[in-house]
Image (spheres, coloured by chain):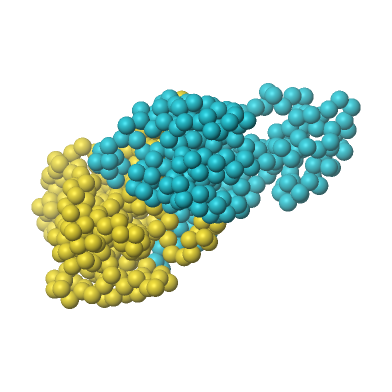
Chain colours: A cyan, B yellow
Amino acid sequence: MQTRIAILGYGNIGKAVEQAVLAADDMQLAGIYHHNDNLDAIDADVVALCTPTRQVPDFAEKLLSRGIATVDSFDIHGQIFDLRKRLALVAKEHRAVSVIAAGWDPGSDSVVRALLLALAPKGITYTNFGPGRSMGHTVAAKAIPGVKNALSMTIPLGTGIHRRMVYVELEEGADFATVEKLLLQDDYFAHDETHVVPVPSIDVLNNVAHGVNLVRSGVSGDTHNQRFEFNMEINNPALTGQVLVSCARAAMRMRQEQRYGAFTMIEIPPIYLLSGNEEQLIRTLV
Amino acid sequence: MQTRIAILGYGNIGKAVEQAVLAADDMQLAGIYHHNDNLDAIDADVVALCTPTRQVPDFAEKLLSRGIATVDSFDIHGQIFDLRKRLALVAKEHRAVSVIAAGWDPGSDSVVRALLLALAPKGITYTNFGPGRSMGHTVAAKAIPGVKNALSMTIPLGTGIHRRMVYVELEEGADFATVEKLLLQDDYFAHDETHVVPVPSIDVLNNVAHGVNLVRSGVSGDTHNQRFEFNMEINNPALTGQVLVSCARAAMRMRQEQRYGAFTMIEIPPIYLLSGNEEQLIRTLV
């Protein structure tokens, strides 16, 4: 039984979802739609929302109200719980399933953080990002007057502290010292160690590599100094696209069990993310 | 609402479960039982089975048939699926829940392996164990004639290959060369690089530290070279005990949802393992 999955939004993530769908033996591409298209034209079991994050809530709500499952990688951490609440209502009413915040952070990192909390309930988890491009900081840097193009790299310094390396390509006649001063005052950069580096071209720096180093030292029972670490070095959109497809599969499984609603990845049995025979998966993985 | 948890078997793991129960705000100790005790005397919501692995199936079956949930860290990988089948029948019949193979491997490592497969469906995962004591190999070494006491350490060499460092305390008058030869011929040791080291006392080497280095390089969509790594360095029984208690909590949650049966950890939503308010957990972890 193939799952018919449509893609809404065809940027980096939409293209990565397409590749992950083509690589999956249980998925069939049910169309690629631009975010300005008429949503009523979409005919699919599940839609991967690959639009800018802020458009996700409205699109998801519309599709869920038609009984179509959705997956998204909504990434504004502070608003995820409210999105879950809003989409759960629509999803339950229309017997649909939505898997939200399904990327790598939020997403698979969230699953690792939950697991480590179960393994050592007391202690501190540090999530160290990078080296990799920060979308939010890059956009903020581009908005500085005099900046033609920019790239903000996140460099992990450990214990959740990050350095920002901001590469700027200046507009003709712009003064670097002025740009640097404005940028360092910007709220996005004022709180971290930030270095501004002028470069002749941003284009040649382009690289979608990213990484995470997630560490926890904690207490199991009354035993301290239990140490855990999760690392990854990945192509960012490729991983996000893959997570969306794996979560689309999980959404189908939840619907099959009539567990309607909106779910983050920590609310989903990991085996639901996987293609293949249940017995074989358990025999191989457990 | 407190969960009343009993402990069956009071060795290293049973004691660790006790500590994890005492540290949990939602758990109440409902008794500690020896594995020779009459099981009918146990009055609890859930029982942590801390007996030798081979006794787990019968004990679990008896308790489940009384509608009492069970958790175990049954660790014979090749028999887990069959145990799940056997216990699922009894659990469903008596509206009970059993969480099986709930330790760190099988257990939390299984969850990591499942997650990494979802993130990069093609590729190879290597689970490298140690340095740490292997129970099975230690027992095999102790069975060699002339060995008074033994300790077999597992040393990871990468790509799932392990070295065995076997420390032996000889019986009076035993010949080391003979013991070494017999040990190296034993099926437990014949297939790995094995070093036998005579020591005056095993007791002074005793240490329950263990570790894992789990690595995967795989393909997300059509993007190769996605690299993931999970490491831990832990007190072995303390972690196993903690996992059992976290899974006892998950068993209660599954029962509350009337999802009766037997489940491995990859079939359980990670959030079910955790104590605390759902909204706060999602806001903190996702």
Res A97 → quadrant: top left
- Please give the name of the residue rendered at 47% of the width and 31% of the height, measured from the top-left corner: A43
Task: Give how far across and how far down residue B156 sits, in percent.
Answer: 34, 42
In this orientation, does residue A156 appear?
A: yes
- Which residue is at the front of the view, B269 or B126? B269
Residue A225: % across, % down: 45, 60
As drawn, is A195 to the left or to the right of A174?
left
Total marks in image: 0
Q: Nearer the viewer, residue B208 or A214?
A: A214
Q: Position of residue B215 (x, y in %)?
A: 40, 39
Q: Which residue appears at 34% of the width and 59% of the height?
A: B257
Which image quarter holds the N terminus of chain A?
top left
What's the residue at 48%, 64% (across, down)? B277
Residue B2, given in percent of the width and then of the height, sits at 37, 73
Quadrant that contains the C terminus of chain A: top left
Q: Is residue B221 above or below residue B111?
A: above
Question: Residue at horizontal 42%, vertical 61%?
Answer: B274
**Is B27 placed left or right of B262 in the picture?**
right
Q: Is residue B265 left or right of residue A48?
A: left
Vertical arrangement, residue B214 with respect to residue A24, above or below: below
Residue B158 visible (yes or no): no
